[in-house]
Amino acid sequence: MEMTRVTPPQLPSPSSTRRRLASTCLAIALAACSAEKPRSGARGVGTAGDAEAGSSASSAAGSGGGATSSSSNSSSGEGGSAGGPLIVGQKPMAGAGGAAGSASTPRDESCVTTKQEAERLPVDMYIMLDRSGSMLATTGAGPTKWDATRNALESFISDPRSEDLGVGLQYFPIGKTGVPVSCQADTDCGASNGPCVNRVCRPPRIGASIPVTFCLSDADCPLRSPGCAPAGTCASDDSLVCFSLGANGCGTGDACAPLKGECYGYASCDAAVYAQPEVQIGTLPGAASGLVDSLRKATPLGLTPTYAALSGALEQARQRAQAEPTHRVIAVLATDGLPGGCEMDTPLNVQTLARQGLAGTPSVTTYVIGVFGPDEAEASQNLNAWAAAGGTGTAFIVDPTKDVGAQFLEALEKIRSGAIACEYKIPPSPTGSTLDLNMVNVALVETSRTRDFRYVTEAGRCDLAELGWYYDVNPSSGKPTKIVACPKACDTLKSTQNGRVEVRLGCVTMGPD
């Protein structure tokens, strides 16, 4: 009898495709299908809370010489847009011959009328969690990838440090209406959602213990495999995959029952489906019970329709940001497989989506967590490209040969701390009048020094200043709602152990040196 032993004993459906009808590593297999990891972010500014300030100016000031004059246009409301473009200038340093102050040398503060500790924005995250079949593969620490990541999420949600964080949740793939979760024949899937993926690449020799690769044809199998064939499991030991279907297919009367597979067209490719949360974004700890209950009920199966999933996540985050303009809303994509299952599922298309999310109005950043082995360099490169396009630098890569739960939890904690560090509310005018956007500055106050930030007008000009900031909306085109630190400035804030961010009113807004 031709049989091969595999672990774990469950036989989930395929979950990650590298070709259009790719061979798929399943949970039944020892091999974990690719997963990717984003890089970790760091915590906010020391013990002082982060905050946001804001109203903004739109033209950069010249440097050197004397002070650049500012037009005191009145704003239309708190943090509102002035009637015309604002002129950003620099007040001369006292006794410095008119030279503008630098980030490391604070300028004369005699013009400052108000200093307010910046109040950081509330943060909402929409988590798009991969529940594809490969999540049932075992990890180096013992549990499956699914159990490890689910337990990590539960710990994160219950952590007191996550209090006041907004969290929403959806999974991918989501099945199409009317398509069964498993199949044994193409006809089970219907005319347009087949074939049934329940054939397996034969092992190179009888009795070999190997990862099981589901296939549709010989072309999907490794070169050392004899080819793709119908397969089953032995009635007395479902860790044995057999190829002689029938009553005595496993020998001594032990039946070889046909293997349950999965309809290739099971996964929905409609982004709108993934934009609807399984659990609506809610504030912790109140939202914790609904999130935990959902995680405990969810089960892995299916392919990895990453393009539709991320598209939906960005849309939900965008809707949330529009409804809550004083919140920072981020998308978190957690996956263990390369894109597969839908026409748009290519790494480059996913990267383009992340870039569009960042460039949109309101802007949505994308954090990426991937569960991929050290030998899967291509997968890690793709995930890093997605994170960079989404404005978060690099992905957090979780190694499935080690403790996935601990690594996944660490990634979530770094995302949480990084997300709250660098956006701040716009303060009201202390006099109750309209805030003058020409008279707003930002500074990092530490024990031994104060460093001034420089207003750069927009994200694309952040390279003009070591410590730059801008408004989420340029006042010349709309009403800003928050102050945003540029990436380098954000890194500085996250690495500062003892300090606070101040919004200072009364002096002409400082542009780049």
Image (cartoon, rainbow, N blue to C red):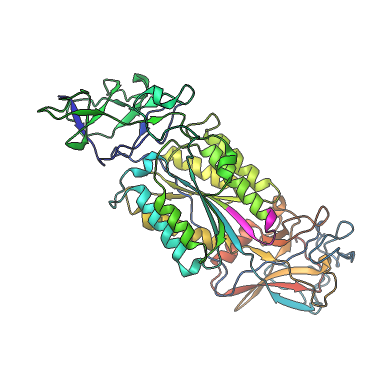
Whether residue 101 appears in this view of the structure is no
Left or right relative to 163: residue 453 = right
On the image, the x and y values in percent for residue 506 come to 81, 74
Quadrant for the C terminus in the image: bottom right
The residue positioned farthest toward the front in the image shown: 178
Q: Classify residue 236 by image quadrant.
A: top left
Quadrant for the N terminus in the image: top left
Q: Classify residue 255 by image quadrant.
A: top left
At x 47%, y 57%, the residue is 291
Magenta part of the chain: 322-330
On the image, the x and y values in percent for residue 450 come to 66, 74
The residue positioned farthest toward the left in the image shown: 252
Left or right relative to 86: residue 459 = left
Q: Classify residue 94 by image quadrant.
A: bottom right
On the image, the x and y values in percent for residue 210 come to 24, 34
**Pick the front one: 249 or 177:** 177
